[in-house]
Image (cartoon, helix red, strand yellow):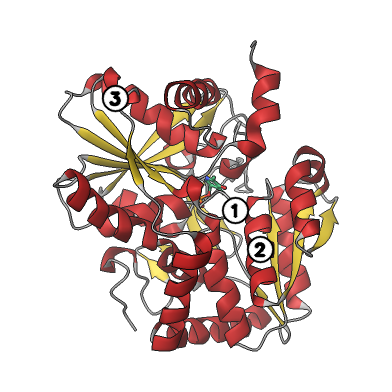
Amino acid sequence: MAHEQLNPLVLPDADGNFGKHGGKIGHPKLAAALAEIEAGFRSIIGDAAFVEEMKRLQATYIGRPSPIYHAQTLSKRGAQIYLKREDLNHTGAHKINHCIGEVLLAKKLGKKKVIAETGAGQHGVALATAAALLGLECEIHMGVVDIQKEHPNVSRMKILGAKLVPVSAGAGTLKEAVDSAFEAYMSQFDGSMFAIGSVVGPAPYPEMVSYFQSIIGHEAREQFQSQYGGLPDEVVACVGGGSNALGLFNAFINDESVDLVGVEPAGEGLDKPGRHAATMTLGKFGNIQGFNCYYLQEADGTPAAVHSIASGLDYPGIGPQHCHLKDLGRGRYETVTDKEALDAFLALSREEGIIPALESSHAVAYALRRAKELDGNRRLLVNLSGRGDKDIDYVLSKIDV
Ligand SMILES: *Cc1c(COP(=O)(O)O)cnc(C)c1O
């Protein structure tokens, strides 16, 4: 069943494909569980009571709509820069948008528990928050290396009542945490639901997560028109898995005058394999963790090691809808280095008094670079996906103050 929240270009066919990307690849046991989630998803989005409950929580719990702020000091570089303030949401990022949706769905399906992976801990915190709100148990799988690095988020998850499962396999980071969480899920389909953290994974996850995140773009398009008049020339967002970007882009896909720009991490440089995560720029087509997309590969097709200063962008693959938008020539994907992201982090902090997440700083860095190339009457709308509290100690260790 189609639904009007998502543009047809980012809706899957009956097999969960977006062009040649997406799909649902994996264990037959998993197929039955995915079918249950998909049927549940189709039923709730057509259910007026669910839609009302979602709207009530968006307004009274998340704090939506998030404002659009015209960053006039940053804009002195050239083009006008506007920020969609997802950093002002409860828990400080866009992830709460889909976590509330996923936990409401789990509850509707009669599940007692949600299970997920987390890298930097952002998805873990947002999911633990939604689970606490709605009275479900929450089990978060996290690599031991990330547990060491992301201490404040680990503490938050514990305080919120989540059960933390440390994962020591392999590199002890996000990819291993995903494998571990999926394995745990396979042994307890009946009582639990897997709640993924981005527009990745097998169908129906990319469609479902983008549906819940599409609130960003629907709000932004209306706010921009009513507060500033007309439409922006470019809408810009950082891409890890791609959920905050797709949430923004979706509402603008039919606006031909609006460029959709995804910004991926060039890390320490595109010429340094293993030290960036520029999936769209250098990835190849193939299947990773249950779906087809472009991803960074070793010669034998296994996922390559990746790096970004922003842990939330540190994933070798990317959501299938973005790959499809790229193939169609509708999405444009640019890169920003660690250094440029750090400079943008400081520029936004010191020129506007807003401390952004290092992930979001990639989108800001592109906008600062782009603004200089454009006239002062052109307008860039940047999704500020999250706030930077989690990054302050790391940034201080990198700069002289
Ligand atoms: C997780 C995260 C991201 C990256 O995830 P997407 O799915 O690509 O949006 C970006 N910004 C923040 C603040 C995050 O927490």
Mark number, residue 129 = 2
The verdict on label 3 being within 8 Å of ligand 1 is no
Q: Nearer the viewer, residue 58 or 163?
A: 58
Q: CA distance from mark 1 to mark 3?
A: 28 Å
Disc 3, disc 2: CB below 8 Å?
Answer: no
Judge whether residue 370 can be spotted in this image. Answer: yes
Determine the residue positioned at 57% across, 32% down. Answer: 276
Point out residue 277 in the picture as x, y percentages from the top left corner.
55, 37
- The residue indicated by pointer 1 is 91
The kind of residue on which mark 1 rests is Thr
In this rendering, the count of numbered labels is: 3
Q: In the rendered view of the protein, which quadrant contains the N terminus?
A: bottom left
The quarter holding residue 19 reads bottom left
Of the image marks 1 and 2, the number of the one nearer the N terminus: 1
Q: CA distance from mark 3 to mark 2?
A: 36 Å
The kind of residue on which mark 3 rests is Ser
Q: Horizontal placement of 161 versus 327: left or right? A: right
Q: Horizontal placement of 239 versus 275: left or right? A: left
Crowding near the residue tagged with mark 1, few <14, some 14–19, many ≥20 C-alpha atoms within 10 Å: some
32 in relation to 76, above or below: below
Judge whether residue 306 can be spotted in this image. Answer: no
- The residue indicated by pointer 3 is 75
Crowding near the residue tagged with mark 3, few <14, some 14–19, many ≥20 C-alpha atoms within 10 Å: some
The verdict on label 2 being within 8 Å of ligand 1 is no
Disc 1, disc 2: CB below 8 Å?
Answer: yes
Q: Horizontal placement of 179 versus 57: left or right? A: right
Determine the residue positioned at 52% across, 35% down. Answer: 356
The kind of residue on which mark 2 rests is Thr
Q: Secondary structure at mark 2?
A: helix
Point out residue 311 in the picture as x, y percentages from the top left corner.
63, 40
Of the image marks 1 and 3, the number of the one nearer the N terminus: 3
Point out residue 387 in the picture as x, y percentages from the top left corner.
54, 41
